[in-house]
Amino acid sequence: MGNTVCYRFRNYTITADKAMLPRYQAVCVTGDDADCGADSGSQPSPADVERWIAEHTRDTGHDLYRRAPWEYVRATAGAWQ
């Protein structure tokens, strides 16, 4: 006798959590063989990240960065299908 398997699916709603403020971060990706990898860490504003980039560029001459805003979201489970 074979086994019978039943899969159930669930949809999720993803929404921004307005109680949490967004954060910002930059990573230096300057380098031919490997990225520098210097990281601004999580910052409270874009201006703080821009200041970090300017200082890192001043100190190293590096000029290529990956910059990202981070927001907090909540996942709310829907009904089982």
Image (cartoon, helix red, strand yellow):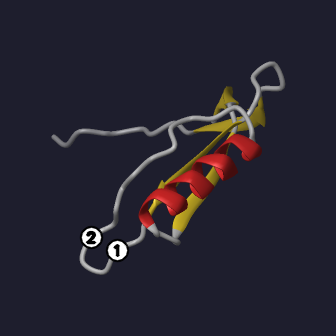
Q: CA distance from mark 1 to mark 2?
A: 5 Å
Residue positioned most to the bottom = 32
Q: Residue at x 74, y 46 (%)?
A: 46
CB under 8 Å between discs 1 and 2: yes
Position of residue 16 relative to residue 46, above or below, is above
Q: Secondary structure at mark 1?
A: loop
Residue under pointer 2: 34
Residue positioned most to the front = 59
Position of residue 39 relative to residue 44, above or below, is below
Callout 1: few (<14), some (14-19), or many (20+) C-alpha neighbours within 10 Å? Answer: few
Q: Is residue 57 left or right of residue 15?
A: left
Residue positioned most to the right = 18
Quarter of the image where one finds residue 13 = top right
Quarter of the image where one finds residue 12 = top right
The three-letter code of the residue at mark 2 reads: Ala
Q: Is residue 16 left or right of residue 12?
A: right
Who is closer to the viewer here, 38 or 14? Answer: 38
Q: Residue at x 40, y 51 (%)?
A: 38
Residue under pointer 1: 31
Callout 2: few (<14), some (14-19), or many (20+) C-alpha neighbours within 10 Å? Answer: few
Position of residue 80 relative to residue 58, above or below, is above
Quarter of the image where one finds residue 14 = top right
Who is closer to the viewer here, 33 or 12? Answer: 33
